[in-house]
Amino acid sequence: MAVPEALAGLTAIPGVRTAAQLREPSPDDAGPGELLTVLPALAPLLPGGGLRRGSTIAVRGATSLALALLASATRDGSWAAVTGLPELGLAAASELGVDLERIALVPDPGPELAAVLSALVDGFDLVVLGPPVAAGVHPQLARRLASRVRNRGAVLLTVGPWPAADLELKVSSRHWHGLTPDGYGHLRTREVLATTTGRGAATRPSSVRLQLPGPDGGVVAGEPPKRHLAEVAG
């Protein structure tokens, strides 16, 4: 996907490329409706097992899940932009599998919100909006951006609710594991229940249990072995 000149001056956190360094579009780039890959543990949550280009997806309850959805696509060569998450931890994103060389960070889109978000949708395969940005988008702008996302074949991910999202992923039933029954040890994994609802093929809810993060900081399907780990709600 081409990158607009308006983004050429964006400043990224050290180690992360800016939009000015992105590749030119390739004839092999997928168009609207094609799927971007996700980690195997996340595939059962998504219709077709991937992120459908041209779609809007609201992720509620866990910023880490929104970042994990970027992992496989960025490793496969897609580019992502993240805005409105100034506290984003790059080490945690890397542990989740995200290729940091293919992410541009825009901590604050500033007063020209509509222009910046439109430029990001034009220039990146995936765009993530943090809670303050997503909450600041009024319904009319949300409709315009959704139309732009469909036309450009991008994927828009919001951390928090989004008007008329094609898909909503919700994280609930969080439990940390790792402490012994008497309270010693280290928190190592977090078990969550992730549920998908949406339109079309996603009308029927789909739920999977995940370790988010798992023992190595990534995403693992299923529950941790409770015979070895004590449960701590949180």
Image (spheres, rainbow, N blue to C red):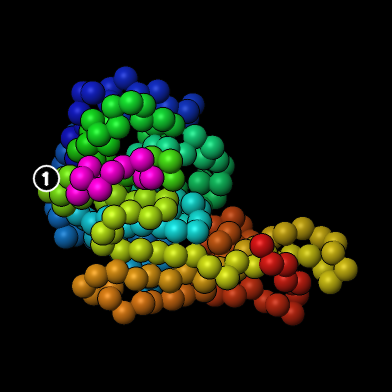
Please state, as top left, top right, bottom left or bottom right, where the N terminus lies in the image. Answer: top left
Residue 172: in magenta span = no
Where is mark 1, residue-wise?
A: 27
Q: Disc 1 residue type? A: Pro
Please state, as top left, top right, bottom left or bottom right, where the C terminus lies in the image. Answer: bottom right
Residue found 28% across the figure and 44% down from its top: 138
**x then y, percent, for residue 217:** 59, 55
Q: Nearer the viewer, residue 124 or 23?
A: 124
Residue found 37% across the figure and 34% down from its top: 104
Residue found 43% across the figure and 41% down from its top: 132
The quadrant in which residue 10 appears is top left
Query: Horizontal placement of 162 versus 216: left or right?
Result: left
The residue positioned farthest toward the top in the image shown: 9
**x then y, percent, for residue 26:** 16, 42
- The magenta span reads 134-143
Q: Nearer the viewer, residue 234 or 28?
A: 234
